[in-house]
Image (cartoon, grey):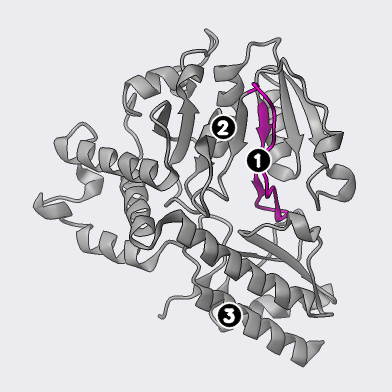
Amino acid sequence: MARVYNFSAGPAALPLEVLERAKEELTDWQGCGMSVMELSHRSKQFIGIAESAETALRQLLDIPESYRVLFLQGGATTQFGAVPFNLAGPGDAADYLVTGSWSKKALAEGKRFCRAQVAGDSQESGFTEIPDPADWSLDENAAYLHYTPNETIGGVEFHFVPECGDVPLVADMSSTILSRPIEVSRFGVIYAGAQKNIGPAGLTIVIVREDLVGKAREDTPRMMEYAPMAEAGSMLNTPPTFAWYMAGLVFQWLLDNGGLSSMGQKNRAKAELLYSAVDASGFYTNPVRPDCRSWMNVPFTLADPGLDGRFLEEAGAAGLTNLKGHRSVGGMRASIYNAMPMAGVEVLVDFMKGFEARYG
């Protein structure tokens, strides 16, 4: 069967070149007579894989030496709790910007472990925009300011980095990391689940400023504490070795293809093409305010929701898969992460135009 264009929000498409290389090495990694999945995480071979992956990620993001890079488990959801455990005491205030489903979940978890408070909220708009910074209520004594740069479900994205003075800025970059250059030094903690732009599910990247390591409260579970993980090279226990290896291949693929500046240009072009098609149509609608639209996740609705099933059926037959919107918002959603080529977006746009001509 020919490969399809996979618009899944995650686990998401992986670069074909990466999959082909993993296929070649699957049963015998670099002549060692065994698969990467069979290598001991303490072995010289896997230590080399781990170090190469970190080196490539540091190069891609230009990560300063004053930051530690952790390769962890538990998904970004575990970091909803790990962040307050590591940065805030039980009575400490922590600010949260709430712009969609994932930031709401981060806030709810934060409230379990510290005095988490809403600094800005766009719920009244149905999470279709970023709240105006002039309306934010920031606490200059907060332990941190948390935000979600890109809301995967609603397709809302910050196209700026929040200003919060000396308060550490914490970002859940699960669905936007590696999609374009970022200035890591503006953040205290960046965390991201792997299954969108990094690699297969099972790995979580945490980039944490050195001065924020070692501040965890005493009752922090060791598996959630940054300091012992950093000291152990992210190998306090057996790490997700295959996912780590695959992430390293993706990092190298990005470097080989022009790095994040090049990827940012490609992602902008893909998003502009798809949004232009939606906006030019009276049949499709995107609910997000234009200046807050995501480059990575593009939701859209049909004029007649009764056609949703037919749209998905015909799209699938055309090799366009996983376009169904999240159950909480309905409609359609096209996730166009790094591994989605422009050709895939062009095929989707052509299909949308044809579908509108038939049923509009």
Q: Which residues are magenta?
A: 145-167
Task: Name which of mark 3 and mark 1 comes first in the sequence.
Answer: 1
Task: Name which of mark 2 and mark 1 comes first in the sequence.
Answer: 1
Instruction: Give amino acid for label 3.
Output: Glu
Q: Mark 3 to mark 2: distance in Å? A: 35 Å
Q: Is residue 166 magenta?
A: yes
x 23%, y 57%: residue: 26
Q: Which mark is residue 161?
A: 1
> Residue 286's quadrant in the figure?
bottom right
Task: Name which of mark 3 and mark 2 comes first in the sequence.
Answer: 2
Q: Which residue is mark 2?
A: 187
Residue 187: image location, x then y, percent: 56, 32
Is the Cβ of the residue at disc 2 closer than 8 Å to that at disc 1?
yes
Side of 355 where 72 appears, left or right:
left
Residue 151: image location, x then y, percent: 68, 49
Q: Which residue is mark 3?
A: 346
Q: Is residue 24 above or below residue 117?
A: below
- The main secondary structure of the magenta stretch is loop
Which circle, 3 or 1, is nearer the viewer?
1
Q: Mark 3 to mark 1: distance in Å? A: 31 Å
